[in-house]
Image (spheres, coloured by chain):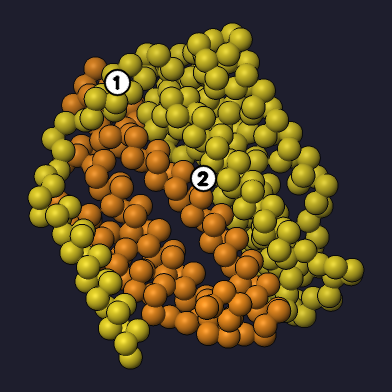
Amino acid sequence: MTLITILGFILIVIGIWGMLSQSNIIKIIIGFSIVDTGIHLVMVSIGYLKDRTAPILDEAVGKAEALARVVDPVPSALVLTAIVIGLAVTALMLAYAVKLHEMKGSLDIHDLKELKW
Amino acid sequence: MIKKYAVLLLLGAFALMLLPFVTEVTPFEELSPVAQKYVKDGPDELGSANLVSSVIVTYRGLDTLGEVAVLFIAAAGVGFMLRRKGDVKKSLRREASGILRSGTVFLFPLVLLYGIYIFLHGHLTPGGGFQGGVVIASGIVLLLLADVSAKINGTVLQWIESLSGAVYVALGVLGIVLAAGFLDNRILPAGEFGRLLSAGAIPLIYSLIGLKVGAELVGIIDSMQKDEL
């Protein structure tokens, strides 16, 4: 696979490490964002075909030769939507973090014992 | 200590799981059959030069509608979590510097114009409703940074958001009546390939998405900055 795919996988692993090992909620959210970015990279690189160009037709890439010259538009479309969803979910998580800090006065995950057994 | 090793073990197992993707999967040489159909028939069928836009707005239009709904729910969630009871605390921020203030006066209209340009040309160039909406929201952030006492009119935001969302769905339903199915862009004439007024309803739908996303993100920013601790 391409280098980009491997880098994406590395980002996913780093992000999961961050989510599992950090105890500050903000750092956990950052870990989630890193996983998100890694997944986007992997998806885009799967749709990428060697030596091809973006799926936008103009004078340089005509309708007739498009089939042989453009990359897969479907993963690009998926990643475009995934980026926006990631942004919204991150904002929602940060709002939770603000609320937790308001209630507990702390962002350490060990101070939140309600869901522990 | 044991937790640290458990995390490392889990990560090792996860990396091992991903290893076959790296070593055994070979990159594709050809487009997948679905993509082949989109690339071959898309330009003539829908008239959009940007094939990603034709996939997002028409071929997978329902997904995009769902995505807009997810974004709406997230924005509503943020607004719900960060709502203030009673009067808003007085802002503790100091006045913005002169550079920021005069820079904003110069840049804000340009940023706004650029956002509108991006979503209007979504069917011709890289870009579209989501990117344009985010650019517009970033312009509003600039405005809020420069003017500490600036207030966002929530009613106007809500109207922009709900109107564009309702018209988006109405256009989709119109596609069932006038064209082949829900969110079909051929309810308007296809026009000349590669011109601004082409690709049927794609520029219209992208403009609505741009307004909606911009309004939602401004709402998120507004509820976050109102809640200074």
B1 and A84: which is toward the camera: B1
Which chain did the renderer colour yellow?
A: B
Secondary structure of the residue carrying numbered label 1: helix
- Mark 2 is surrounded, within 10 Å at the Cα level, by few (under 14), some (14 to 19) or many (20 or more) other residues, namely many
**Disc 2 versus disc 1: distance between alpha carbons?**
26 Å
Q: Which residue is mark 2?
A: B131
Secondary structure of the residue carrying numbered label 2: helix
Q: Which residue is mark 1?
A: B37
Q: In which chain is the residue bearing label 1?
A: B
Q: Position of residue B156 (x, y in %)?
A: 80, 45
Splitting the image into 4 quarters, where does residue A89 fall?
bottom right
Amino acid type indicated by mark 2: Gln
Point out the tag, 2 or 1, that comes first from the N-terminus.
1
Which chain did the renderer colour orange?
A: A
Task: Point out the residue furthest to the right here.
Answer: B86
Residue at 62%, 53% (x, y): give it: B74
Answer yes or no: is residue B78 visible.
yes
Q: In which chain is the residue bearing label 2?
A: B
Note whether B13 is above or below B119 in the view shown. Answer: below
B41 and A19: which is toward the camera: A19
A36 and B203: which is toward the camera: A36
Horizontally, residue B140 falls left or right of residue A28, namely right
Horizontally, residue B13 falls left or right of residue B60, namely left
Residue at 47%, 25% (x, y): give it: B58
Note whether B133 is above or below A8 in the view shown. Answer: above
Note whether B3 is above or below B47 in the view shown. Answer: below
Q: Position of residue A107 (x, y in %)?
A: 58, 81
Residue at 55%, 27% (x, y): give it: B203
Amino acid type indicated by mark 1: Lys
